[in-house]
């Protein structure tokens, strides 16, 4: 393990995969933190952003940092749903994903950068489509009424 990111690995482990159920499914404290009414999801996002801050400090490419922020955003947004959000937090594991992104860049994986661009572009297209398509449908519905 790279000593520069030992703190990141420890945080990701505790939040996302410190414990194991019979059958091998791993989970962490993130799902439980998200159950705290009102502030759980905010606390979870703040813990997750620590990993992003460390990536910035280590000079990770901006596109990878953008992907890391999107991972945290996806987990925070979908994790905010009552009960089902805690299950999503437990399954999605944004902290583990971000730790692996950080680790692969420190180890010098160049192919990771292309995957980062693909992820960010596809997520952007999906975000635009999720806003644009309902608006188009509403406009068409309004025309017919």
Image: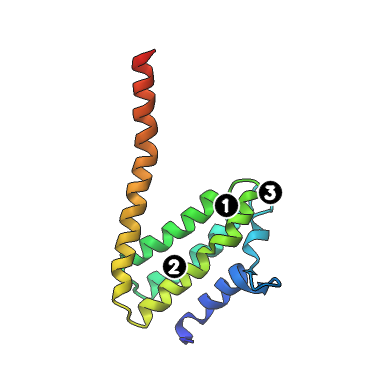
Label 2 sits on residue: 53
The answer for how far apart the CA atoms under marks 3 and 2 are is 26 Å
- Residue at image coords 44%, 66%: 52
Which one is earlier in the sequence, the residue at label 2 or at label 1? Answer: 2
Q: The residue tagged with tag 1: helix, strand or loop?
A: helix
Foreground of the two, 145 or 82: 145
- Left or right of 9? Residue 116 is left
The answer for how far apart the CA atoms under marks 1 and 3 are is 12 Å
Label 3 sits on residue: 37
62 lies above or below 18? above
Q: Which of labels 2 and 1 is toward the front?
A: 1
- Residue at image coords 37%, 52%: 123
Point out residue 47 in the picture as x, y percentages from the top left corner: 56, 64
Label 1 sits on residue: 79
Q: Residue furthest right?
A: 22
For the residues bearing labels 3 and 2, Cβ distance under 8 angstroms? no
Point out residue 49 in the picture as x, y percentages from the top left corner: 49, 63
Q: The residue tagged with tag 3: helix, strand or loop?
A: loop
Quarter-wise, where is residue 69 in the image? bottom left
- Residue at image coords 35%, 59%: 119
Asked which colour scheme the image uses, the reply is rainbow
């Amino acid at each position: 393990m790279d000593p520069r990111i030992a703190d990141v690995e420890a945080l990701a482990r505790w939040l996302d995969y410190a414990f194991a159920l019979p059958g091998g499914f791993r989970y962490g404290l993130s799902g439980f933190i998200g159950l705290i009414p009102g502030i759980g999801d905010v606390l979870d996002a703040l813990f997750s952003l620590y990993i992003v801050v460390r990536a910035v400090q280590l000079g990770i490419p901006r596109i990878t940092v953008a992907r890391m922020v999107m991972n945290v955003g996806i987990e925070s947004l979908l994790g905010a749903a009552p009960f089902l959000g805690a299950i999503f937090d437990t399954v999605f594991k944004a902290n583990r994903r971000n730790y692996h992104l950080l680790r692969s860049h420190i180890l010098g994986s160049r192919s990771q950068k292309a995957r980062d661009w693909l992820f960010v572009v596809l997520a952007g297209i999906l975000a635009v489509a999720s806003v644009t398509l309902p608006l188009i449908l509403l406009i068409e519905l309004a025309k017919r009424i």
